[in-house]
């Protein structure tokens, strides 16, 4: 079998050797630099063949879409994907809140987020909370996968899997500069080169950005990535990536109160609060083509994230604002809720193409070893509203280790039909130690998750797909094990998921439509406030999410095109007894689960110009299990009204070296509430703009 045939079977296999081969035949390094692909784990892969193999809903935001839309963050880019709803917090997506199919977007806890196949959340088995988001400026595309195919990854794939794919190094130097509203400014540098032999490539990508923030919550962020790789003979390739991220954001859990929102939505209600993040990560990908039909991929990853959240202590809340504890030496007025996460793991996957059972088969077998550690401390001061040190009042160490096995086999029954059964087993243990008292505790769990998916190519341009699988998400250590070391027997989230859909193309038309059903035996949600101050989490019992999502694209001709998608979730409810303060919430709608989200975009292309006008609609949402409609005095409860936000984008390629671009978000300056979580009203960003230029030397 030729290598290109094997690539058809395993679309994520790299075509980077083509660069070295072509170089040996005398091609220029500049022409080949863009062909070099370093080994990595893709969730979907490249091209229509890769999409057609997925027995589930698929979305890919490609390089062209990112170039045109110039999203301010990865979260901003994902707004246009069917099934996804995002919840704004500080406006720039530094603290991502991404939900899927009616699942709460709080800290992106209900889905698995990856970067080049590596987990982004700092602790998979401690708390799947995203305190960091990779910068969109260094991404070449984003993959979104839902359905049974997500069993290849884990844990926390109930909602789906998002994989950010970083740019590969390219020959030359590219400089990007942006400026915009609220003092926003960005400077980016991408530089790379190819070895004279063509068997090695490397590069650096740097971004520095500052701004005054949408609510006078200024920030200063720096991001550096070193990435490279090489061929190890004819059958092996290796790639490595080192990242460093540093960000200081003047943001808070404290939102606006009702009168503050009405009178001054740009107010920073907690100017002493700072969210300080520092992250270093390292990963190595190795690929070994054992034969034409067998490939072994191995990924080693490590990261350390420090998140220091310095916040003034709240004394009282009313409709006019928030009162903070005075720093007069009588009580703790400033707290540093400081956490350091360390994560590492090894993920190895064996891919085999074979002819067993009288048919073509594609088998993948994998194992992953993973460990998490969290040092959770609280420092408190009674005298300094800008303290960065104080009395140690909390010192908590949490650890988790997990081992996962999975296997799936794609039976290619005929040229049109393929069936893919799979099984994933996750076994993990969690521990917690109070370093101040010496009290400790442990918890252990094993989850078995079967799944099956199928695709049927009804016509050359139309495909049906279906899948069913068991999903789970581990309980947070802080809630699974009490501070006194007692196992709380807080079960993991478990769900049974079904999906049925169709996708295809017909001349100028492309489309995908999916029906989904997520039946939770146990969903973990906030017990009182919707993630607000003082909230705890609880086993919510049975919940049910079901609905439809669809996307359509049509080429109108003469450079014009239209794209639309919608997600309708008529059911997202408590499906068993849920008693809070003596009242049963059974049948109530789940928090932060809008019934309808939709996107519509009109685009135009001519010559080097690309432009689009888009609209994003989010229907009304409840923020608590009680489904409170009327706004309460401090703004933490009450319905979030529906809103529509328009965005205008333009990108012009002057020549091969120079490009200029611009975007206006919230074009009509819509004033709306994006969230009441964690503690008060968080408004959506008012009208803002950015303009920029890129030049490649």
Image (spheres, rainbow, N blue to C red):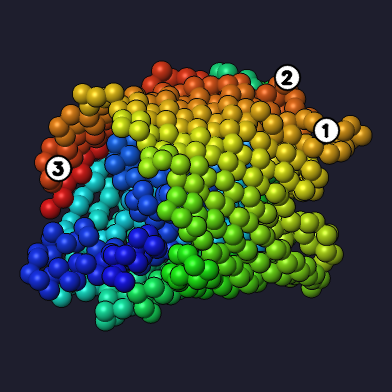
Nearest to the observer: residue 275 or residue 101: 101
Q: Nearer the viewer, mark 3 or mark 1?
A: 1
Residue 3, can we see it? yes
Give how far across and how far down residue 318 sits, in percent: 71, 26
In the rendered view, would you say 696 is above or below 668? below
Q: Secondary structure at mark 1?
A: loop
Residue at the spot 66% in from the left edge and 28% down from the top edge? 570
Q: Nearer the viewer, mark 3 or mark 2?
A: 3
Q: Indicate the quadrant containing the N terminus: top left, top right, bottom left or bottom right.
A: bottom left
What mark, if any, has residue 658 been given in the picture?
3
Q: Secondary structure at mark 2?
A: loop
Nearest to the observer: residue 249 or residue 604: 604
Give how far across and how far down residue 232 sits, in percent: 29, 80
Q: Earlier in the sequence, mark 3 or mark 2?
A: 2
Q: Secondary structure at mark 3?
A: strand
Q: Earlier in the sequence, mark 3 or mark 1?
A: 1
Identify residue for label 2.
630
Number of numbered callouts drawn: 3
Give how far across and how far down residue 560 sits, in percent: 26, 24
What mark, if any, has residue 585 been given in the picture?
1
Task: Please tell me in which quadrant of the rendered image residue 270 appears.
Answer: top right
Residue extending farthest left? 26
């Amino acid at each position: 079998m030729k290598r290109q045939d094997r690539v058809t079977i395993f679309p994520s296999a790299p075509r980077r050797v083509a660069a070295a081969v072509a170089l040996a035949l005398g091609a220029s390094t500049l022409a080949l630099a863009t062909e070099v692909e370093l080994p990595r784990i893709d969730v979907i892969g490249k091209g229509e063949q890769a999409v057609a193999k997925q027995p589930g809903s698929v979305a890919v935001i490609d390089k062209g879409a990112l170039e045109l839309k110039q999203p301010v963050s990865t979260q901003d880019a994902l707004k246009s994907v069917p099934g996804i709803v995002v919840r704004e917090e500080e406006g720039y997506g530094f603290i991502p809140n991404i939900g899927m199919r009616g699942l709460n977007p709080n800290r992106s806890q209900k889905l698995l987020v990856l970067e080049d196949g590596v987990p982004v959340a700092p602790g998979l088995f401690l708390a799947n909370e995203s305190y960091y988001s990779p910068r969109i400026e260094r991404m070449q595309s984003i993959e979104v996968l839902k359905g049974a195919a997500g069993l290849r990854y884990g844990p926390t794939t109930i909602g789906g899997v998002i994989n950010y794919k970083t740019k590969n190094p390219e020959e030359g130097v590219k400089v990007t500069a942006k400026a915009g509203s609220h003092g926003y400014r960005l400077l980016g540098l991408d530089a790379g080169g190819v070895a004279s032999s063509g068997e090695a490539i490397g590069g650096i990508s740097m971004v520095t950005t500052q701004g005054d923030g949408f609510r006078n919550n200024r920030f200063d962020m720096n991001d550096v990535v070193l990435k490279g790789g090489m061929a190890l003979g004819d059958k092996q390739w290796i790639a490595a990536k080192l990242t460093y991220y540093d960000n200081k954001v003047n943001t808070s859990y404290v939102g606006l109160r009702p009168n503050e929102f009405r009178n001054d939505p740009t107010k920073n209600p907690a100017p002493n609060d700072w969210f300080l993040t520092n992250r270093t990560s390292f990963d190595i990908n190795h690929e070994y083509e054992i034969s034409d039909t067998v490939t072994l991929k191995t990924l080693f990853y490590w990261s350390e994230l420090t998140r220091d959240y310095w916040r003034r202590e709240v004394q009282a809340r009313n409709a006019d604002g928030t009162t903070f504890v005075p720093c007069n030496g009588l009580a703790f007025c400033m707290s540093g809720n400081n956490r350091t996460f360390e994560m590492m793991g090894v993920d190895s996957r064996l891919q085999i193409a074979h002819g067993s059972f009288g048919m073509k088969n594609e088998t993948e077998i994998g194992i992953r070893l993973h460990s998490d550690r969290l040092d959770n401390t609280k420092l408190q001061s009674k005298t300094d509203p800008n303290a960065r040190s104080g009395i140690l009042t909390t010192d908590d160490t949490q650890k988790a280790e997990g081992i996962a096995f999975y296997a799936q086999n794609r039976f290619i029954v005929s040229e049109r039909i393929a069936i893919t059964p799979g099984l994933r087993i996750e076994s993990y243990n969690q521990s917690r130690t109070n370093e101040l008292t010496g009290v400790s505790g442990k918890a252990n769990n094993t989850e078995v998750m079967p799944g099956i998916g199928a695709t049927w190519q009804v016509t050359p341009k139309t495909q049906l797909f279906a899948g069913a699988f068991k999903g789970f998400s581990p309980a947070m250590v802080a809630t699974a094990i009490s501070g006194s070391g007692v196992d709380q027997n807080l079960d993991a989230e478990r769900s049974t998921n079904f999906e049925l859909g169709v996708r295809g193309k017909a001349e100028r038309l492309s489309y995908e439509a999916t029906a989904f059903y997520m039946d939770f035996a146990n969903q973990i949600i906030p017990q009182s406030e919707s993630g607000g101050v003082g909230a705890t989490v609880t086993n919510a019992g049975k919940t049910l999410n079901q609905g439809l999502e669809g996307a359509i694209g049509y080429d109108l001709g003469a450079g014009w095109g239209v794209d639309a998608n919608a997600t309708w979730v008529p059911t997202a409810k408590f499906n068993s007894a849920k008693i809070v303060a003596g009242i049963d919430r059974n049948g109530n709608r789940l928090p932060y689960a809008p019934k309808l989200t939709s996107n519509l975009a009109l685009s135009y292309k001519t010559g080097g110009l690309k432009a689009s006008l888009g609209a994003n609609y989010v229907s009304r949402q409840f923020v608590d299990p009680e489904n409170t409609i009327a706004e309460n005095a401090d703004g933490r409860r009450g319905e979030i009204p529906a809103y529509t936000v328009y965005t205008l984008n333009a990108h012009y390629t002057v020549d091969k070296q120079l490009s200029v671009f611009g975007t206006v978000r919230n074009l009509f300056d819509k004033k709306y509430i994006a969230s009441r979580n964690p503690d008060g009203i968080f408004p959506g960003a008012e009208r803002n703009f950015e303009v920029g230029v890129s030049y490649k030397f």
